[in-house]
Image: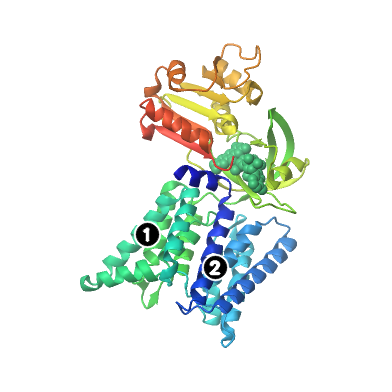
Amino acid sequence: MMKLIRRSLNGVTMYRLMVYYLGVLFLGGVAVGMMGAAFLDPVGLVVSLVLSVASAWVTNRLFSFFLKLPTNAESVHITALILALIMPPADFADPMTLAAIVLASVAAIASKFILTLGHKHIFNPVAIGAVVAGVGLNTPALWWVGGTPQLLPLVILGGLLVAYKIERLGMIAVYILSNLAAVLLTTPPGMMGMALQQTLLYSPLFFAGFAMLTEPLTAAHGRWSRHVYAAIVGVLSSSNIHIGTMYFSPEMAFLVANIYAWAASPKGRFKMKLIGVEEIAANCYEFVFQSDRALKFRAGQYLDWTLGLSGSDKRGNRRPFTIASAPGASAVRVGVKFNPQGSAFKRGLLRMQEGDTIYGSQIAGTFVLPRQREKKLLFIAGGIGITPFRSMIADLLERGEKRDIVLVYANRSADEIAYRELLTRARNELGMKVVYAVSGEPGSAIYDDVTLVQGRMDETNLRECVPDLDERRVYVSGASTMVSGFLKMLRKCGVRRRWIHTDAFAGL
Ligand SMILES: Cc1cc2nc3c(=O)[nH]c(=O)nc-3n(C[C@H](O)[C@H](O)[C@H](O)COP(=O)(O)OP(=O)(O)OC[C@H]3O[C@@H](n4cnc5c(N)ncnc54)[C@H](O)[C@@H]3O)c2cc1C
């Protein structure tokens, strides 16, 4: 069952999954309204959605046209859907509800272009939209999706899939626990049961967590900062927290936490100009870019890349790619794997000409070398999963820093081995041991004095190539299935779980 879920989630991007999640919740709301089970008018809901999508879409097109910036169409739909799920449903008898949904949508999208610092928007667009409509038209968010208990199973199950897909279950747990703790600590003992029931069944708690806390661009980066961010939203959005007579709404809690996230996160969006493309292995190309300003990152981290596409597909126009170059290098490199039935994004990437631009944002990732140099390391790369190691190795070479490293590089065929020249340098200059594991055709006379394993890597030959396996911190990088396969193998070999670091290239 888990395998099936994992495989289905692999085929869909985070943005697409979020659109499905919100779409299902919206239809659920319409169905509940049609059954007369709640105070939801289905026609009003549909009108709200049409208004929010249309206003968000037009605002987005206008801003991107005048500012000449690429946009992510799916993120516009996500913003519009969330607003339709939280603003009061449109009611022709109360024109303010119609104006509020339009104003909230326009403000949400405009905030992405206007409320920016270092090319990065600071506030969760939905939260801004809801606050503007609340203050400007005295029509605040109703969070009806959270106040409809019939929708709760859908909110939680779908939300868990989203959080699982983007690996934010820990962050959601911190948010929920801090919210409940704040509720309990501020409620008189005799009323705790009722307060808990209210929070769990009738509040925006779960929906706001799954749909808004997970928004990657305005959340904090790095595990601990993310947890602090989640705790701020959790505590401030709990029902009894107030400053003087002002009580926080969930949307205001997000705005406060966004300021923390902005202060704690790496800043900005980088405009990258293509300066070269090189084939580095079969169906793998390296794209070399010049960034408009210096990129501060640690070897092994990645960026979110947004490509201006005229026609996108259901996988959208944004992808995480590891920065394959060393932090100090003048050019920014990414190594990309191409598939025969490739996505619109990858086809667009291949069509790029020298001088064309793409945007990188949100340096992130904890797949980095330990600071203690004496630790023995084992790198395991599958195919294009070599990119974070390429960055680390190039960095070590640049700084002449020797560490005790074994690299096991698994590929289906010899022509899929990338960066061979750099790996040869690492063997010669750093004393790194390199093992090429080739499950298919090994090719001829290319391996010099590296260790070659023919056939699939298994426990026996892993132990043979790395006799001191138990003493090494292990870093595994590649497609999700490869990473989980090696994780199981390493656990069977007795490697401690907390010594294993993984970088799963979801989507491959
Ligand atoms: C932290 C991180 C770092 C990463 N670093 C890298 C990196 O350095 N290099 C790298 O190459 N990747 C990297 N990835 C993976 C990358 O982000 C993409 O998810 C991956 O390359 C797949 O790209 P794609 O969606 O464009 O699909 P493709 O690579 O084009 O195709 C992947 C599969 O999806 C299928 N597919 C494609 N389009 C569609 C469609 N419209 N409908 C249905 N099926 C479709 C294809 O047939 C193929 O089977 C990283 C991922 C993460 C999370």
Q: State left or right for residue 326 relative to residue 489.
A: right
Between residue 151 and residue 453, name the one nearer to us.
151
For the residues marked 2 and 1, what is the alpha-carbon distance in whole angstroms?
26 Å
Q: Which mark is residue 492?
A: none
Q: Position of residue 384 (x, y in %)?
A: 60, 32
Q: Is residue 381 above or below residue 238?
A: above
Disc 2 or disc 1, which is closer to the eye?
2
Q: Which mark sits nearer the N-terminus, 2 or 1? A: 2
Mark number for residue 176?
1
The residue where tag 2 is placed is: 27
Residue 475 point in image, percent of width and height: 47, 31
The reply to whether callout 2 and callout 1 are in contact (CB within 8 Å) is: no
Q: Nearer the viewer, residue 411 or 267?
A: 411
Quadrant assignment, res 444: top right
Residue 423 sits in quarter: top right
Q: How is the image coloured?
A: rainbow
- Taking the image as four quarters, which one is ligand 1 found in? top right
Q: How crowded is the residue under tag 1: few (<14 C-alpha within 10 Å), some, or many (20+)?
A: many
* Screen quadrant of the C terminus: top right
| Residue 141 drawn at (x, y percent) | 49, 74
